[in-house]
Image: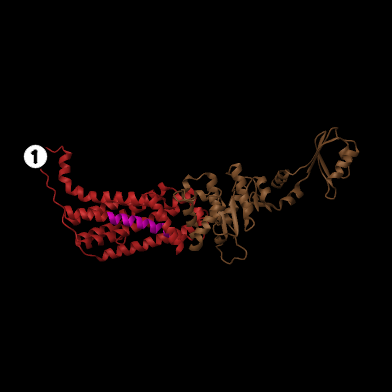
Chain colours: A brown, B red
Amino acid sequence: MALLGPNGAGKTTTLQMLARMLTPDSGSIQFKGYAQKDYRPLIGFLPQHPSFFNWMTAKEFLSFAGKLSSIPKSELNGRVEEVLTFVSLEEAMTKKISGFSGGMKQRLGLAQALLHKPKLLILDEPVSALDPKGRRDFLQLIEVLKQNMTVLFSTHILHDAEQICDEVLILQDGCLKWKGSLPSLRKEFDLLPIKVQTEEPMNGIIEQLEIIEAYEYIDAKTVKVRLPEHVHPNELLQELINRNKAVTHFEMMHDSLEDAYMKVVRQ
Amino acid sequence: MSRFLTLLHKEIIELMRNGKWIWLPVVLMIIGISQPLTSYYMPQILDMAGNLPEGASITIPTPTGEEVLSGALSQYGTIGTLLFVLATMNVIAQERQNGSITLVMVRPVNEWQYLGSKTVAQLALLLLSLLLSYCLTWYYTNLLFTSVDWKLMVSSLVIYCFWVLFVVSVTIFVGTILQHNGGIAGVSILFLSLISLLTSLLPKFMEWSPGNIRGEAMKLLVEKQWTESAWVVIGSTTILSLLLFIAGVLVLKRYKHY
């Protein structure tokens, strides 16, 4: 699940409140089906800029964190090695954290959040500080993790959300603007998903076609259109061919997610 | 309990890795033994310092061992207190500033365990350093002056330890409120000196004051027996420290943001 929103929308604040790092001014947060008020054993949290005790080694830090989460001694060592292998830090586990790179710290942060097998994993902008390769690796880790637990992460990069999320929440000025799956967001807001280009100007033709629900000219030869749900895109192509237009470009646009997002935010 | 021990273990290792277990005992030892040494060599020092006319004679009465030990206690009271505050001031502020407190508090750790581990680790460090330093001072005092009964030495040290307890409690409490090292050290020292000042200005009303601890420890060395007033001061200091600790925990609980 991704939490989207412009800068200052309140994403970090929301996540910190969920992780009990920030006390809400009013209201309370409860974990459904968990009687105790302090639900911290159930969540794993990775802050935006995780900072560790730099004098510890990665392994020491995880053992320390594991003991605080009351992981039994017999399991602790195995568990620490397991998560370190999962985030591919097994070679650096006896090195001091102070010498870690940003990406390594981020992965260690993920390791500590996973250590106690939480039900809900909260990640605050987990990939925004990573290089392209690190970002891809990290997203793949999340892909694996979501099989076993709910992963809630914030980002302002739509592309990341699109790759791994089942559901998105769009936040602005502290209010939830929209929630649902990404395809339904596209359906709801994606107005003109087909782009057509012909050799001849199309003036007058598009207007006549009854199968077209809405259209927008980019120039005389290029137009973006939306078809009603029951109409197959091929019918549009057929109509154009029937009218002797040479179609040079026909595209189903998928990256219009950004437009939908902008519409939600501007609402 | 196991969480408390885990935190305590981490605190003690941290104090070792950042070298406090080395420099603090060393500095305290230097402060301690400088007292008997300078007392012993005072005539020579004055002589070497020069500027005395030829033939001038100075007679300095040789102090007794107890007086030298009291002198050492008074050194601990000034420079020592400053050191204690400086060593303790950043234990919480540092973790809040660099954000590492987040990764501790995101786990089921409560405020008692957190603050308790900090206080106990700090007390262990300071009291052990003080013990080493005081024993060394006692050894030199016995060597250079009249010897002091070890029971007296230990008793005066025990009384004095309560001053350290009070200093640590005050500094950690201020540390839960303020975020900057300078502010924490400043406010703590101001508060401690205010207590000492009030104690000497209003002796009638301040018999219970922790500021009397040093006086009681010295009195014990001179009179060679425990007095009732020592117990009063010890009792009130313990209670005050406990209250400060509880107040610190309450402040932590009220944090909106770690």
Identify residue type, mark 1. Answer: Gly
Look at the image and tell me whether residue B62 can be seen.
yes
Point 60% across, 62% down: residue: A31
Which sits in the foreground, A1 or A72? A72
> How many numbered markers are drawn?
1
- Residue A47 sits above or below residue A225 on the image: below
Residue B5 position in % (x across, y down): 43, 61
Q: Secondary structure at mark 1?
A: loop
Main secondary structure of the magenta stretch: helix
- Residue B80: horizontal and vertical position, in percent? 30, 51
Q: Which residue is mark 1?
A: B55
Instruction: Give the residue at x 64% y 57%.
Output: A147
Tell me if mark 1 has few (under 14), some (14-19) or many (20+) residues whose alpha carbon lies within 10 angstroms of its own: few
Placement of the N terminus of chain B among the 4 image quadrants: bottom left
Name the chain under label 1: B
**Image check: A38 left or right of A217?**
left
In the drawing, does residue A13 fall left or right of residue B55? right
Q: Is residue A201 left or right of residue B199?
A: right
Segment tinted magenta in the rendering: B116-132
Q: Is residue A18 left or right of residue B58?
A: right
Nearest the camera: A46 or B257? A46
Question: Is residue B123 a member of the stretch shown in magenta?
Answer: yes
